[in-house]
Image (spheres, rainbow, N blue to C red):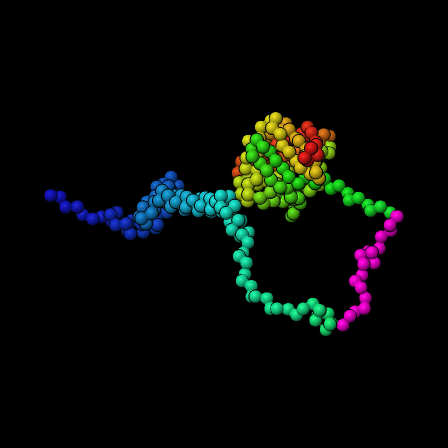
Amino acid sequence: MRRRFKTVSDDPTRMLRGLLAAPPAASHSIARHSLIAGALGQRASDRITAALVIVERGAALILVVLLARWVIEGPLYPWWRELIQRPAPPAATMPARPTAPAIAIAAILPSRGASAASEEFIAPQRRDVAPRPAMRVNVPERLTAPTIALDTAIGEAFVVDGAWQVLDDIAGYLHGTGRPGEPGTMALAGHAGVRGAVFRDLDALAIGDDVFIDADGWRYTYRVAERFSVLPTQIEILEPRAEPTLLLLTCTDWDTRRLVVVARLTAAVPIGS
């Protein structure tokens, strides 16, 4: 049986010292680096694998955070809003103490000797001038779309820090856009997946479906004519049009684009007629 003698090359420490002391040749630099890494117990593939593991764990953490945010602001949001808006139970009240008769109070308090000022004294008005009628505001108040079971109130949204507000739980009328039934472009925006998600089914509206706007005692009927998506920066869609037009806006494609539903006026009748 042949006995194997240990050489200098079999000792990783001595081999590493020799490699570090010898000047590397240009043609053998890659092999030299591999030998050094092997002598140290580390390989390039191991470092790449470790880096990939770190990247994978970071991506998984980001996905968990995004999923938690979607669950909180999506399915759990209506329950949470109802919980925080639930009225508190009435507090127990102490029994009221018996009060003195009104006659006795009148006898104790001194008379001021002057009657209460009349409304005419506080705000005098000319009787020969008819009161000025209140101006019609004609702001949209309610939106309904029967084909997608949409029925929501409308609030007014403004530009805050360079971006339009998106109201929670209701549709938002973009302040300064067109009025119901009037020439121009009236725009309403709403959430699609979070904070009430009033426009979650907006993509189900088809061309030819009717949408109704209630405002100032009138119901305006708009019929869907177009559907498309734009980038969030394409605000030119809000430019006034010659005919009365309604735009319904919501986010789509993971909030990278905006879904736009265009409807045109077909009728206007008093509510209840």
Q: Is residue 159 magenta?
A: no
Q: Residue at x 53, y 49 (%)?
A: 81
For residue 63, side relative to residue 154 (left or right): left
* Residue reaching furthest to the left: 1
Q: Residue at x 65, y 47 (%)?
A: 160
Give the quadrant of the C terminus.
top right
Q: Residue at x 20, y 48 (%)?
A: 6
* Residue reaching furthest to the top: 208
For residue 43, side relative to residue 98 (left or right): left
Give the quadrant of the N terminus.
top left
For residue 112, side relative to residue 48 (left or right): right
Q: Is residue 120 magenta?
A: yes
Q: Is residue 255 visible?
A: no
Which of the two residues, 200 or 110, is positioned nearer the viewer here?
Answer: 110
Which of the two residues, 156 or 257, is positioned nearer the viewer here?
Answer: 156
**118 up-or-down from 222: above or below:** below
For residue 80, side relative to residue 6 (left or right): right
Q: Position of residue 103 (x, y in %)?
A: 71, 69
Q: Position of residue 199 (x, y in %)?
A: 57, 37
Magenta residue span? 110-128
Q: Position of residue 96 (x, y in %)?
A: 59, 66
Q: Position of residue 85 (x, y in %)?
A: 55, 51
What kind of secondary structure does the magenta stretch mostly adopt? loop
Q: Residue at x 64, y 33 (%)?
A: 212
**18 up-or-down from 226: above or below:** below
Q: Is residue 42 visible?
A: yes
